[in-house]
Structure formats: structure tokens, C-alpha cells
Image (tube, rainbow, N blue to C red):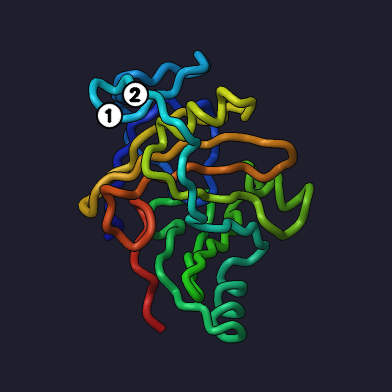
């Protein structure tokens, strides 16, 4: 049986390609000092009122690739490039709109996603642009601050920070847009110990 993921957010109709849907929504709790679009992004120091001197520290969390056949692509990447399977999400795990395989190689993580129905952002991206990178996930230590920081400096606010939880812990995710079709997802996984994200299961054997 798939793990049940719980969501807490104020998402604006965004389809996130690196996580499975649908999940339960409840209201978000934002840290003190975080006011979107005000030009003030405060850090978590005393009272939440100490302004950061520098921008958020980002590492590459995952490169999300839109492909026509995720099953075939995952087999190819594992066989030809020796990538290691980490996690999986699809209709069997409660994600009816996509099929995703999470692979790792040399410390880099790739998510291969294909659409399972003709509607939705992933299907539209494949129809308009073909296979290729559709989303870049950036690992941050504070998704609220990173989102504020980026939006204050001109990034499009696609989805405000929200939480996803399962028995492995909680991640905080936000989405920003820049020029072009590729979205940037901000991921804070400091309180999460699962294989990838809530709703993903360990990679099937074989």
C-alpha cells in the first residue's frame, strides 16, 4: 500500500511534476517575519527579525525530465549509464496523472516523469516542447525565506510554501517561475528522511 502524504499549502492551481498528488490540504503556518512581496525577508534568528546579509544557500536537489515513456527511459538510464533507482511514484501509489522514477548517479539526482493522461502541465509540455528538462529542484534550508528572497527580486510566485508529510517526516516546497518554460522548485528536506518526497515509494526491485 502506498504511504499517505499530507499537504498544507496555499497553492495556486500548480501541477508539480516531481511529487505525486492528490493529498489532503490544511492551512499553512508561516514563520514570523515572512511577508510575501514586501521586500523584507528575515532570518530565523532572535524573534525572526534579523535580516539575512546574503541570499539563500541552494544546492541542486533534482533535475526533472519530461519523457514520453518513463518506464523505458528509466531502464535505459539504469542499463546504459549505470544509474541507481531510488524511488517511484505512479498510478499504483496514488499519483494518477504521472509516472516518475527517481535515479541517482555520482551524487546527482534525476526524476524521469511521463504523463499518464493527455491533460495537465506535463502532457502540455511534452506536446509543446518535446522531451527535456521541465523543472529544476533546488535544495534550501528555509523554503519560506528562499521564496520571499526570489519573489522580492522579480521571480514569479507560482506556488507559496507548503508542507508535505508522511511517516518519514515533512518537507517544505515552493515554486517560482523565471523566463522560459522551466520552473524552479525550492525544497527544504531538513526534516525528512524518506527515499525522495512524501508519496514516493522505494524503487521497486528488479
In terms of sequence position, does the residue under pointer 2 or pointer 1 come before the other?
1
Residue found at x 56% / y 71%? 71
* SS type, badge 2: loop
Label disc, if present, on residue 168 of the rendered structure: none
Residue found at x 50% / y 75%? 106
Residue furthest to the top in view is 38
Q: Estimate how packed mark 1 is, as few (under 14), some (14 to 19) or many (20 or more) residues with alpha carbons within 10 Å.
A: few
Give the quadrant of residue 30: top left
Q: Position of residue 32 (x, y in %)?
A: 30, 20
Q: Position of residue 202 (x, y in %)?
A: 34, 68
Q: Estimate how packed mark 2 is, as few (under 14), some (14 to 19) or many (20 or more) residues with alpha carbons within 10 Å.
A: few
Q: In the picture shown, does residue 198 fall above or below 103? A: above
Residue found at x 52% / y 26%? 12
Q: In the picture shown, does residue 155 fall above or below 35? A: below
Which residue is at the front of the view, 48 or 187?
A: 48
Dots 2, 1 in contact, CB < 8 A: yes
Residue found at x 51% / y 29%? 149
Q: Quadrant of the C terminus?
A: bottom left
Q: Position of residue 40 (x, y in %)?
A: 46, 18
Q: Quadrant of the N terminus?
A: bottom left
Label disc, if present, on residue 45 of the rendered structure: 1
Q: Which residue is mark 2?
A: 50
| Residue 202 falls left or right of residue 158 | left
Q: What's the CA distance linking mark 2 and mark 1?
A: 6 Å
Which residue is at the front of the view, 51 or 128?
A: 51
Residue furthest to the front in view is 53
* SS type, badge 1: loop
Residue furthest to the left in view is 167
Give the quadrant of residue 172: top left
Amino acid at each position: 500500500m502506498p504511504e499517505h502524504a499530507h499537504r498544507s499549502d496555499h497553492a495556486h492551481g500548480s501541477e508539480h511534476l516531481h511529487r505525486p498528488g492528490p493529498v489532503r490540504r490544511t492551512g499553512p503556518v508561516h514563520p514570523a517575519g515572512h511577508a510575501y512581496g514586501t521586500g523584507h525577508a528575515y532570518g530565523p534568528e532572535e524573534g525572526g527579525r534579523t535580516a539575512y546579509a546574503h541570499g539563500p544557500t541552494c544546492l541542486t536537489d533534482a533535475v526533472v525530465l519530461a519523457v514520453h515513456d518513463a518506464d523505458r527511459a528509466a531502464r535505459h538510464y539504469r542499463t546504459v549509464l549505470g544509474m541507481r533507482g531510488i524511488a517511484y511514484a505512479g498510478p499504483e501509489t496514488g499519483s494518477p496523472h504521472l509516472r516518475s522514477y527517481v535515479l541517482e548517479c555520482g551524487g546527482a539526482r534525476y526524476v524521469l516523469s511521463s504523463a499518464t493522461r493527455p491533460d495537465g502541465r506535463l502532457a502540455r509540455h511534452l506536446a509543446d516542447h518535446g522531451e527535456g528538462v521541465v523543472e529544476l529542484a533546488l535544495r534550501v534550508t528555509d523554503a519560506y525565506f528562499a521564496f520571499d528572497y526570489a519573489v522580492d527580486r522579480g521571480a514569479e510566485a507560482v506556488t507559496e510554501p507548503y508542507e508535505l508529510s508522511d511517516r518519514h517526516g515533512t518537507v517544505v516546497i515552493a515554486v517560482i517561475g523565471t523566463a522560459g518554460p522551466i520552473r524552479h522548485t525550492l525544497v527544504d528536506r531538513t526534516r525528512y528522511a524518506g527515499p525522495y518526497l512524501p508519496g514516493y515509494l522505494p524503487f521497486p526491485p528488479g
